[in-house]
Amino acid sequence: MGNNVASIVFCGASFGIVDEDDDGDQPSLQRFDAIDGATKEESEDAFLTEFTNVLYGGLSVKKHDGDTSKKRLLKLDQDGETLIWSVKTSKTSSAKNQLDKLDAPFKLGSITSITRGAFPGKASTKKKAKRCFTIASDNGNTYRVETKDSETRDILADGFELMLRRTPNRA
């Protein structure tokens, strides 16, 4: 592929989806130079639109639960309000149709905070910590997410934080 699929502006920086090596893996989100003349609000609106579109298509991440981590496709449901962890299981998996409570869909509105960095109580290298963030929800669930690289982590965390700021009736 090797070309920019999408790019938009967010607070002086834009981002896009790029597959530089065409290795079959999920492409990375990457930042690009900003477009001159855009206001902060216009930049945030454009970023949020593109971020939402990326989530509708899904983004491959590692989801950490306890001592295990599994690849998941983090997607925004068509209702525009629910995040879904799509599970890729093998044909021989006995748990093919079973989801634990941390794999259950959850509402964007239930997110209370986004924390970047190593997961609390879990040893991590500095390099790995730069790829990780945690989503806390109002039902007490904590979703520990690892991305392909630090830039993708920052863009996802920025997107969720912007959604938090823009959600009406938040305490």
Image (cartoon, helix red, strand yellow):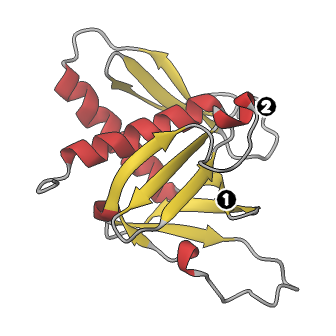
Name the residue: 47% across, 48% down.
54
As drawn, 67 above or below 115: below
- Among all residues in the image, which is located at the extreme top? 36
Instruction: Give the number of the mark in front: 2 or 1.
Output: 1
The disc labelled 1 sits on which kind of residue?
Answer: His
Name the residue: 53% across, 60% down.
143
Q: How many marks?
A: 2
Q: Are marks 2 and 1 in contact (CB under 8 Å)?
A: no
In the foreground, 129 or 81: 129
In the foreground, 67 or 73: 67
Kindly report the distance in space between the C-alpha atoms of the residues bearing marks 2 and 1: 26 Å
Quadrant in which residue 80 is drawn:
bottom left
**What's the mark number on residue 168?**
none
Quadrant in which the N terminus is drawn? top right
Name the residue: 67% across, 59% down.
64
Nearer the N terminus, badge 2 or badge 1? 2
Residue 40 placement (x, y as % from top left): 21, 22
On the picture, is 154 further left or further right than 121?
A: left
**What's the mark number on residue 64?**
1
The disc labelled 2 sits on which kind of residue?
Answer: Asp
- Among all residues in the image, which is located at the extreme left? 169
On the picture, is 166 further left or further right than 47?
A: left
* Residue at the disc numbered 2: 21
Say which element carries label 1. strand
Residue 84 placement (x, y as % from top left): 49, 69
As drawn, 158 above or below 108: above
Say which element carries label 2. loop
Few, some or many residues within 10 Å of mark 2 (<14, 14–19, 20+): few
